[in-house]
Amino acid sequence: MAYIREGSPGACKGLPMTTAPAAPLTGIRVLEIGNFMAGPFCAMNLADLGADVVKVENPDGGDVVRNTGPFLDGESSNFIRLNRNKRSLAIDLKHETGKELFRTLAARADIVVENLRPGTMRSLGLDYAALSALNPRLIYVAASGWGQDGPYASHAGLDIMAQAMSGLMSITGEEGRPPVKAGVPMCDLACALYGALGAVSALHARERTGRGQLIDVSLLEAGVSFAVWESGEYFGSGAIPRRHGSAHQATAPYQALRSADGYFVAGATTPKTWVAFCKVLGIESLVDDPRFTQPHLRHTNLAELLPLIEAVTVTKPSRAWVDALQTAGVPCEMLQDFGQVFNDPHLLARNYFADVPHAKLGAVRVNGSPMRFSETPVHMHRAGPMLGEDTAAVLGEIGLSAGEIASLGERGIVAGPAVLS
């Protein structure tokens, strides 16, 4: 990561380094029109990679995530982390002057990211067809619940709906219990990542063709794309996948196991690790039991196997089992809550978290990026912006004078703390 951790030698309260090398997307300009998760998370990843992301928001409140708690001195803790590394331009896109300003920005942009309901940008005259006519090199990422066409296209598309329709909820949770969604908005987040991957791929393609393109990504298809084992099961045998709790779809033991103080996870699926697992637990008799000699047999007979395992594992705390199994070479780990995750010594040693500046709150801690480049590292340089924090600067970059910007502010077309000053 291109930052110094707070408290490390040379640190200045966790603020970013000023001599960091250029990030991979340095020089790329992105316009984001997004609410909630998919569009903003897509653009956040592009911003982490060095793109100059201008978040275009309605002057009347901005992104709805700004209204989600918890709040820090009136600012959404969620927003300032989801929208790190971006600039905020507060502009009314329903006003013709606002639309013209956006078109001017799009004419010089490389990427537009939006996650509005299909047809909304077209109704504003700001869809891919309109903008690519002004800028044929423009790459336009349209993220939606169901895609830009098809019978579901006009439906509302929230993450839980995509998790339900994609089949993910049908296999999440315990057998015989109510359906459960993933604890994080997986369809939103995966759609965003596919959008970011599509955008950087389109940048590469543009080097060959000279042309941009439209990238249509949806929550539904992002969710279905995770069904790797499930598609193999259904298309291979016709069987409809079901819930397995924390267990694996095809092999065992590979799941959370009860201990004296909670749970830990283990995966003893190879001949070597299965034997080692049984030795550590003192259940060597199971190694040659015909019900459990192969991973698929252990999976088939898991209802018989699991009680035999947990009758032993509940006798000691998780830490004792994890230490013993790891010493024996069996893959296993503790089951951590997020209080433990956000203070995990491994993540801290790898400088995963960053302390970045916010205009109102000072230094705030954000998640880092999982992408680690040896030559062009990702940058963490600011927390999510105040609404319209960069309106004056962004409009100044396209040639508007301070007086012109102030006039727009007086008419309610743009907003921001420096607009009327």
Image (cartoon, rainbow, N blue to C red):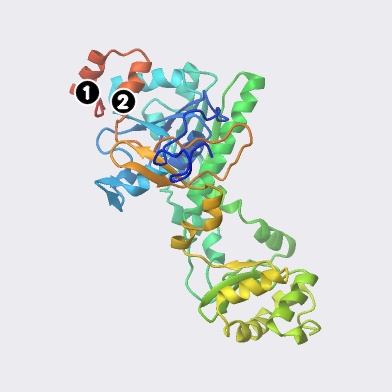
Q: Are marks 1 and 2 in contact (CB under 8 Å)?
A: yes
Question: Is 254 placed above or below 150 here?
Answer: below
Q: Residues within 10 Å of mark 1 (few under 14, many from 20)?
A: many
Between 75 and 22, which is closer to the camera in this rendering? 22
Tag 2 or tag 1, which sits nearer the N-term? 2
Q: Which residue in the protein does label 2 denote?
A: 391
Question: Is 65 placed above or below 321 here?
Answer: above
The x and y percentages for residue 190 are 54, 48
Which of the numbered marks, if any, corresponds to residue 409?
1
**Disc number lying in front (1 or 2):** 2
The x and y percentages for residue 21 are 55, 28
Q: Which residue is drawn at 64% across and 26% down?
A: 205
Q: Is residue 357 left or right of residue 42?
A: left
Q: Can you say which quadrant of the picture contains the C terminus?
A: top left
Which of the numbered marks, if any, corresponds to residue 93?
none
Q: Looking at the rendering, which quadrant does residue 172 occupy? A: bottom right
Q: Can residue 269 be seen in this view?
A: yes
Q: Can residue 255 be seen in this view?
A: no
Residues at marks 1 and 2, CA–CA distance in whole angstroms: 10 Å
The x and y percentages for residue 291 are 76, 83
